[in-house]
Image (cartoon, rainbow, N blue to C red):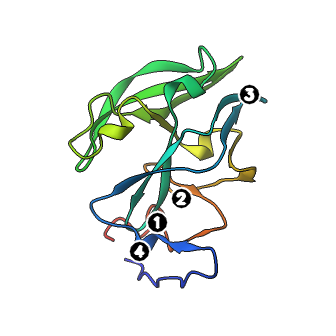
Amino acid sequence: MAKRQRIEPGPGQESVWDYPRPPRVEPVHARVTIELGGRVIADTTSAVRVLETSHPPAIYLPPEAFVEGALQPAEGSSFCEFKGRAGYSDVVSGDVRAPKAAWHYAAPSRGFESIAGFVSVYPGRMDRCTIDGETVQPQEGDFYGGWITANIVGPFKGGEGTWGW
């Protein structure tokens, strides 16, 4: 297992190693956009983020931020020890379909009621996700959906050798 060396945050930055466990939900005071198939499919200033130790924030958007038809129910679910059972959606834009690229908690666990119905996407499966115009970098791996911006430092869970963190 790779050893983690906390990166010391610079001015205006935050370390994921200072995020809490269990996670915390807080508002995003920025414009959030998601693009797929060459067009903007979601746009909001009412997003929230979930902060959890060792993870870049997962950004959740209200469902009304998405254009009609962009989210189509998909089979399957997963379970988070903190947030509860997640359902999945395909993300669709024109002829482009990103299977199971979005997830939501219809009835999240106590303490996470504020994300009920809100939707997060895997930024690496979209054309582009932005926070206040900055293009987000996706979290490594194929399980977690963190959104990395210049003001977030790691190292981040998700890549090879990090499962035991």
- Picture residue at 40% right of the left edge, 68% below the top: 19
Q: Are marks 2 and 3 in contact (CB under 8 Å)?
A: no
Mark number for residue 140?
2
Question: Mark 4 Cα within 10 Å, few/some/many (few <14, many 20+)?
Answer: some
* Amino acid carrying mark 1 in the image: Glu
Q: Is residue 75 left or right of residue 35?
A: left
Q: Quadrant of residue 162?
A: bottom left
Tell me the residue that label 4 is attached to: 18
The first of marks 1 and 2 along the sequence is: 2
Mark number for residue 160?
1
Q: Are marks 1 and 2 in contact (CB under 8 Å)?
A: yes
Q: Are marks 1 and 4 in contact (CB under 8 Å)?
A: no
Tell me the residue that label 3 is attached to: 37
Disc 1 on helix, strand or loop?
loop
| 1 vs 2, front mark | 2
Rounded to the nearest angstrom, the CA distance separating label 1 from label 4 is 22 Å
